[in-house]
Amino acid sequence: MDRIIVFGRGKFFTDFAEKLFQQYEIAAILDNRLDIGEKEEYCCLGKTITVYHPSQIGKLGHFPVLIMIKDFWDAYRQLLELQVEERRI
């Protein structure tokens, strides 16, 4: 099963979480609602995933990033500014 990082954990993510868990192992979730350097545990459908501020993506491994928020372009630009290779997004 491929490992991915998910950007966003709002309604869009929760609506599709079951399908995502069937297809991927979610290594981490990125969420701008956290402060820089903060992390927390998030439980969804019986799975616990660590959530990080996007600025910490460099510490999370070289996994593809699946953007799961309505403001796709804002998240896309943010990831590029954080030096995430475009092919990972």
Image (spheres, helix red, strand yellow):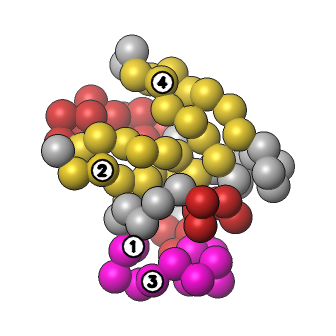
Q: Nearer the viewer, mark 4 or mark 1?
A: 4
Query: Relative to 54, is 11 above or below?
Result: above
Q: Which residue is mark 3?
A: 85
Q: Which residue is mark 4?
A: 48
- Please give the name of the residue rendered at 37% of the width and 74% of the height, measured from the top-left corner: 88
Q: Which residues are magenta?
A: 77-89
Q: CA distance from mark 1 to mark 3?
A: 7 Å
Dot 3 or dot 2, earlier in sequence: 2
- Tell me if 18 is positioned left or right of 68 in this view: left
- Please give the name of the residue rendered at 68% of the width and 32% of the height, measured from the top-left corner: 40
Asked whether the residues under the numbered discs 1 and 2 touch, taking CB atoms below 8 Å apart as contact, a structural biologist would say no
Asked whether the residues under the numbered discs 1 and 3 touch, taking CB atoms below 8 Å apart as contact, a structural biologist would say yes
Q: CA distance from mark 1 to mark 2?
A: 13 Å
Q: Which residue is mark 1?
A: 89
Disc 2 secondary structure class: strand
Dot 3 or dot 4, earlier in sequence: 4
Q: Which residue is mark 2?
A: 3
Where residue 16 sits in the image (x, y, percent)?
31, 38
Label 3 crowd bin: few (<14), some (14–19), many (20+), radius 10 Å: few
Dot 2 or dot 4, earlier in sequence: 2
Where residue 34 sits in the image (x, y, percent)?
76, 45
For the residue pair 25 and 11, the one nearer the viewer reads as 25
